[in-house]
Structures are given as structure tokens and as C-alpha cells.
Image (spheres, rainbow, N blue to C red):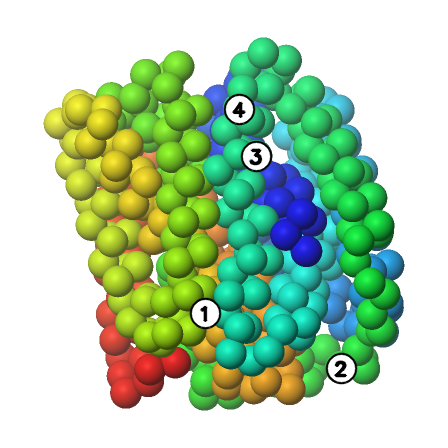
Amino acid sequence: MALGTFAVGTDAFVLAAFLPSMAAGLRVSQAAAGQAITVFAIAYALLAPVVATLTARLERRTLLVGALGVLALANLGSALSPSLSVLLVTRVLAAVGAAAYTPNAGAVGAALVRPEQRARALAVVIGGLTVATALGVPLGGVASHWLGWRSALALVAALCLLAGVGVAAIMPRLPGNPRVPLRDRLAALRRPGVLAVLPLTVLGMAACYTVYAYAVPTLHAVGVPTADGTLMLFLYGLGAVLGNLLAGVVTDRWGAVRLLTGAYVAMGGSLALLGGIAAHGGGAELAVGLLVLLWGGSSWSQTPPQQHRLIAAAPSEAPLLVSLNSSAIYLGISAGTGLGGLALAHGPAAAYGLGAVLAVVAMAFLTVTGRGRKG
């Protein structure tokens, strides 16, 4: 499962690594090119429940391999796009493949272990996404630097095909699930436990993606030379991997609410400090690197406890709730990317500041809705 989510994560996040060169190649602004990330995220958020409904009865391995095949075709189309409009269409197609893969991978991973190990299993599956931020995105930036952004996207297409072969060879065949009408799926949004979780997912992901989607220009503003941008993306990804893995263990032992509280404090603090450094024209690269590491760790420690809270609220509806959480993740990414593009017009410090404010709002929402809850 993690092998496939690594491919999906690389596809979803790699554009941030070469956004300036892609914008130049398509003759558009960086803020306009960043909408390719926004369109992908919006399409994913809207299509995930629909795709889950239409594919519910499909055998799981067939579904996951097919989804990775769609991702491969979409990335090849992105690599060949002659204009931003064509690129946006291919990103919507990529969102279809991602919407079919990620929620089902998480649900299958959780179903294969005992309840007391569920959070750790989810962390392993989501670990593919975090490893993608640690390795896939920086390597995509390196490939773009030496081969061009189109070749980098072609390599992502090849990675999706390779992951599909791996899933087909290793994953056991598993039956599909009963088809749940879309109306019933959306009815889960009215559950009190779900209402306490999904908006927080949106807020938390919006906070970290306000800046991450524009990582190259915002890191340059805090004194990171262009040549060291890949190293900083690697540090963010390393923090994401460590944060995700620790989140599974901490959630199982001490509860999701405590873990999330610490994550939002760390996220808001790191983004605020980076914003201050940007406002003063840059700072020591070591200090920036440590803050980027903390930012990555706090960002990707959110998902395992959030999924754990949803599944604990309604264990019998785990696939549905994981799918809705995935929609919320990408809705947050789209909101953060869109708001970040607007804030970037006022300078990188404004983008960092907006991310910090959103992290504080997320913590306040958790304080109100999570009061008295340990899980």
C-alpha cells in the first residue's frame, strides 16, 4: 500500500518542486501555475466520494492497479501539455486516479491489522505520501533541473506504472464492498463525531499548504539559495516522515487530541518564525533548516490521528470515512494553495503569516470540538 501512496504522493506534490520553471515554460505567472495544484486538489476533493461510490464493488487489487494506470496516463499527458489549460485538464484526470487509490489503500491497510494497531497501520500507508515529500519531490526538483520539468513528469508517470506492477505482484486479492449510495455517503457528514474531525482536516492542511505549494520562492525569501532549495525540501520531507511515524505511536498511546494540539502549536510557531525571518530579509540557513524540519513534521503528523478519530467514531463505515477525510485533505490543500497565491502577491512573509494564523485557528477549533475527548 505504501509503495502506491508513494507514487500518488509524488504525483500530487512534485509540482511544487519545479513551479517556477513550469510557469516559465507555459508563459504564465507562478501564482497561475500554482493553480495546477489547486485544480488537482479541488477535483480530488469533489470526486473522491463519487469515485468511491462507482467503484465500491470492484475487487480491491484490480481497483488499485487501475488507479495507478490512470495516474500514469495523466502524468504523461501533463508532461506533453502545450498550455496551462491542457495541463489543468490532465491534472483533473490525475485526481481521478488518486481519488480511486488513496482512500482505498488506507481502508485496506486498517482492515489488515488488529484494532490496537490501526493507527500505526494507517501511518505506514500514509507513510508513502510522506516519503514522497522526503524523496519524490526533491528528486523531482533535481530531475527538473537537469532534464526539464516535462521529463520530470514523465518520470513520475513511469513511477506510477512501476508501483502498479508492484501492487499487482504483492497485494492479495480482496473483495469489494457493498455499494453505498452517494446520498448515504454524504449523510455521514451529519454525524457529530465526523463534524468534529473533517473541518479540522481542512484547516490543518490549508495551513501547511499556504506556503508549501510555493516552496521555491518562499524559501528563497528566508535566505535559502536556489541551489539549496532541494535540500530544504528534503528536510521538510524528512520531518514529514518522522512526524507521520511518531503520530501513529503517540496516537495509540496517548490519544489523538493531545498529538494534534502539539502539532498545531509546532506548525504555527515554525511558520510564524519563518515569516519573521522572511520579513527581515533572511537568516541563518541552519536555523531555517530546523524550522522547515519542524514544519514538515507537524504538517504530516495530522493525518493518522484524524483518520483514527473518524474510524473510532464509526468502525463499520471506515472506508467511507477515510474517503471523506481524503476529500477534506485535498480541499484543504486547494484552499491553502489558492490563499497562498493571493498572499504571495504581498510578499513571502505574508504567506508564512497566513499559514501561521490558519494553524492557530485549527488549534482553536480542536480545543472547542475536542474538549473532553482523548481519542
Pick whichever of labels 2 and 4 is earlier in the sequence. 4
Judging by the rendered image, the residue that carries numbered circle 3 is: 136
Pick whichever of labels 2 and 3 is earlier in the sequence. 3
Pick whichever of labels 3 and 1 is earlier in the sequence. 3
Closer to the camera: disc 4 or disc 3? 3
Q: Which mark is residue 306?
A: 1
Judging by the rendered image, the residue that carries numbered circle 2 is: 180
**Which quarter shows the C terminus?**
bottom left
Pick whichever of labels 2 and 1 is earlier in the sequence. 2
Disc 3 to disc 1, C-alpha distance: 24 Å
> 330 left or right of 57?
left
Amino acid identity at mark 1: Gln
Q: Which mark is residue 141?
A: 4
Disc 2 to disc 1, C-alpha distance: 23 Å
Disc 4 to disc 3, C-alpha distance: 9 Å
Amino acid identity at mark 3: Gly
Seen at 27% across and 79% down, the residue is 368
Disc 1 residue crowd, few under 14, some 14–19, many 20+, Cα 10 Å: many
Disc 2 to disc 4, C-alpha distance: 41 Å
> 275 left or right of 203?
left
Asked if residue 174 is positioned above or below residue 266 in the image, the reply reads: below
Return the residue nearer the eye: 273 or 4.
4
> 20 left or right of 111?
left
Pick whichever of labels 1 and 4 is earlier in the sequence. 4
Q: Residue 347 location, x and y as percent?
A: 27, 31
Disc 1 to disc 4, C-alpha distance: 30 Å
Labels 3 and 1 touching (C-beta < 8 A): no
Amino acid identity at mark 2: Val
Q: Quadrant of residue 254?
A: bottom left
Look at the numbered disc 2 and give the secondary structure of its residue: loop
Q: Which mark is residue 231?
A: none
